Image (cartoon, rainbow, N blue to C red):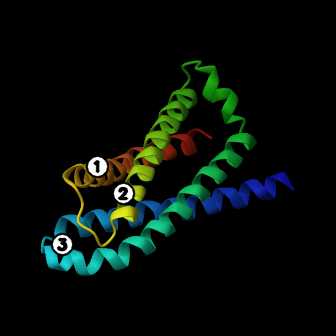
Amino acid sequence: MWEWVTQWAFHIHLIMAISWIGGSVFMFVLGITLRDKEAQKAVYPHIGPIFGWFEVVALVMLLLTGWVMGIHYHLFNTLFSGDGSAISDALQMKVTLVSILTIATVVHFVIAYRTNGKTRTKKEQLLSRGSSMLIFFLNLFVMHYAIVLRNIL
């Protein structure tokens, strides 16, 4: 039974990761290519909330399925052992990056949701764009460490 749950968790984790990273890349590219302010005002209020809620669900699923796989592969012992092994180091780095990514996502989501269709303050604009860019780049590093871990396991 447990093996079945772990297999499903792995597949769901992979699908959610593809969705999360693909969506992040799409929104990042949209943000840097859509320079016309009127076009941004027309597009973001419609796409943003749909994407935001989808991404929240994807992130929650990623965290839950990651937890299931962590239990199955006894990764929590490895994570906290700090024994200097390749798997311990990669796991610690991935968990650290995912923690920062989660915080950046919460910051970005709260600002985006609260200011959707409204003018942002300079601070909100800086935090929103900064967290968005951080999320984009952290995704690439999280994906790298996911590949490293999968190769080791």
Q: Residue at x 12, y 75 (%)?
A: 36
Callout 2 secondary element: helix
> Mark 1 belongs to which amino acid?
Leu
Q: Nearer the viewer, mark 3 or mark 1?
A: 1
- Name the quarter where the C terminus is drawn: top right
Q: Which residue is mark 2?
A: 111
Q: Position of residue 88 (x, y in %)?
A: 57, 28
Q: Which mark is residue 34?
A: 3
Callout 3 secondary element: loop
Q: Position of residue 16 (x, y in %)?
A: 54, 62
> Mark 2 belongs to which amino acid?
Ile
Q: Are marks 3 and 1 in contact (CB under 8 Å)?
A: no
Left or right, 88 with respect to 33, comes to right
Callout 1 secondary element: helix
Mark earlier in primary sequence (2, 1): 2
Q: Are marks 2 and 1 in contact (CB under 8 Å)?
A: yes
Q: Nearer the viewer, mark 2 or mark 3?
A: 2
Q: Which mark is residue 127?
A: 1
Q: Position of residue 2 (x, y in %)?
A: 83, 52
Left or right, 86 with respect to 42, comes to right
Q: Position of residue 47 (x, y in %)?
A: 36, 76
